[in-house]
Amino acid sequence: MEAFMENVNNTSTSIKKWATGDRPREKLLDKGAETLSDAELIAILLNNGTKSKSAVELARDLLSACNNSLHDLGKRSLADLKKIKGIGTAKSVSIIAALELGRRREGLLPAGKTVVRSSGEIAGYLKSTLRDLSYEVFAVIYLNRSNKILRFEIISRGGITGTVADPRVILKRALEEGATSIILCHNHPSGGLRPSLADEELTRKIIHAAAYIDIRVIDHIIVSDEGYYSFADDGIL
């Protein structure tokens, strides 16, 4: 009902009623998506504005509330977006869906690149997948003997400052997947990259347990907005 009323109330400023040269959709078709500003692209997602503002003006308000940063926008929840005047449920859902598609596309390893060759390659994937989360998660990448990725799985979700991972759950899944090695991963929403004492202790615990069933822990990677940290690159493993 809220989405329906939102559309009804906003028909007076529908993009369809704009002058042809001012319509983001027509501009995209005529000149290409790369020629549109961030506000114009978001306006296409919004579809219409309000009685007092066009979709582009509303998109500019949205960007302004996010410090004119698409990165900041990617971190906003549905509830956050709905706090912006003129942005209801329907518009918020469209924005979040578009951002999630972009996040998934960026996070996918290119075709034929499913073999792990470096910590940097994996870190790029992890940053795309985990960087916008406001809470910490612990994930594992399972690999076969050729270092080909068999599975990526988030094992646990926690709070802003930490999460707990059960080695039994991790190794049970490794056996089910037929993995011979694993990469441990987690994010730091706070931004810091250095591992805590708890991170180091958990890593040692999993390495020790995995050794009993001939599974190698080849790295533990931490990602945040600041970059990534690799236990293996730093010589801890």
Image: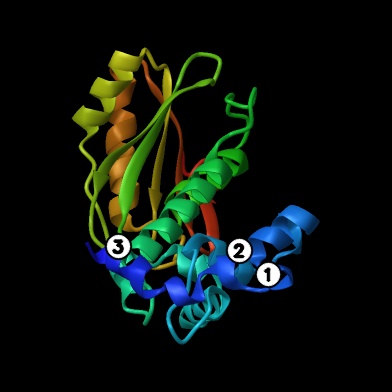
Instruction: Say which of 52 and 208 sits in front.
Output: 52
Instruction: Say which of 220 and 43 sits in front.
Output: 43
* Separation of residues labelled 3 and 2 (CA atoms): 20 Å
Instruction: Say which of 220 and 136 sits in front.
Output: 136
Q: Tell me the amino acid under the disc marked 3.
A: Ala
On screen, residue 28 versus residue 155, left or right, reads right
Residue at image mark 3: 3
For residue 94, what is the image quadrant? bottom left
Say if residue 80 shows up in the picture: yes
Where residue 124 appears, x then y in whole percent?
Answer: 57, 46
* Separation of residues labelled 3 and 1 (CA atoms): 26 Å
Q: Residue at x 55, y 37 (%)?
A: 108
Where residue 68 appears, x then y in whole percent?
Answer: 56, 78
> Disc 3 vs disc 2: Cβ atoms closer than 8 Å?
no
Where residue 139 appears, x then y in whole percent?
Answer: 35, 40
- Secondary structure found at label 1: loop
On screen, residue 155 versus residue 233, left or right, reads left
Residue 37, numbered label: 1
Q: Tell me the amino acid under the disc marked 2.
A: Leu
Where residue 83 appears, x then y in whole percent?
Answer: 31, 78
Rendered-image quadrant of the N terminus: bottom left
**Crowd around label 3: few <14 · some 14–19 · many ≥20 (10 Å):** few
For residue 50, what is the image quadrant? bottom left
- Secondary structure found at label 2: helix
For residue 10, what is the image quadrant? bottom left
Residue at image mark 2: 41
Which of labels 3 and 2 is toward the front?
3
Compared with 148, 136 (above or below) is below
